[in-house]
Image: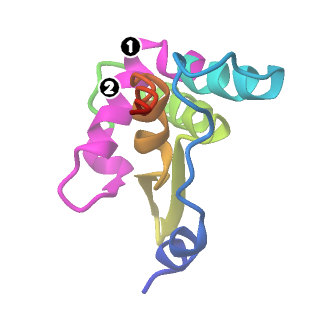
Amino acid sequence: MSNLQEKVAVLPAEPCCPPLTERELTAEEAQRTAAMFKALGDPVRLRLFSKVASHPDNEACVCDIADVGVSQPTVSHHLKKLKEAGLLASERRGTWVYYRVEPSVLAAMGQLLSLAPAPAKVA
């Protein structure tokens, strides 16, 4: 098991925030969530994130995802921004860097944008 896999295995898979329809976000939740969506607000970053998230091995070498119509230094800049927002993790293997989506990111974003469960009916 690689160092990255060991680190990922111990990360909690808890969503950051409740569904938007459940209650108002706290200031901290809003700031954390806005950083994620801001990072994904750039079309190049969204494509890079999509390439990593959809890669068959659940991780992608930068050499496999860099073809997004911008220069390599620009790709590196965008990947750095995705990492800073907590959306990607990375691991260097020799001369290449491999990226993977943080385990709870997609679930957290999905839950945030889902409808809150309806309250149980009392008979």
**Picture residue at 70% right of the left edge, 29% below the top:** 32
Q: Position of residue 94 (x, y in %)?
A: 47, 72
Residue contact at pointers 2 and 1, CB within 8 angstroms = yes
> How are the colours assigned in the image?
rainbow
In the orientation shown, which residue stands out farthest toward the right? Answer: 27
Q: CA distance from mark 2 to mark 1?
A: 6 Å
Q: Which numbered circle lies on residue 114?
A: none
- Reading the image, the residue beneath label 1 is 43
**Residue at x 17% of width, y 56% of height:** 56
Q: Nearer the viewer, residue 100 or 28?
A: 28
- Name the secondary structure under disc 1: helix
Where in the figure is residue 54, as x and y percent of width and height?
23, 44
Q: Position of residue 7 (x, y in %)?
A: 58, 73
Decide which of 59, 104 is in the foreground and name it. 104
Secondary structure, mark 2, is: helix
Q: Is residue 61 visible?
A: yes
Assign the C terminus to one quadrant of the image.
top left
Residue type at tag 1: Pro
Spot occupied by residue 9 in the image (x, y as percentages of width and height):
51, 74
Q: How many marks?
A: 2
Label 1 neighbourhood size at 10 Å, few (<14), some (14-19), many (20+)?
few
| Quarter of the image that includes the N terminus | bottom left
In the rendered image, residue 61 lying in the magenta stretch gets the answer yes
Direction left: furthest residue: 56
Q: Is residue 57 left or right of residue 60?
A: left
In front: 77, or 11? 11
Q: Callout 2, which amino acid? A: Arg
Q: Name which quarter of the figure residue 113 lies in.
A: top left
Which segment did they paint magenta? 38-65
Residue 94 among magenta residues? no
Q: Which residue is mark 2?
A: 47
| Observer-nearest of 15 and 65 | 15
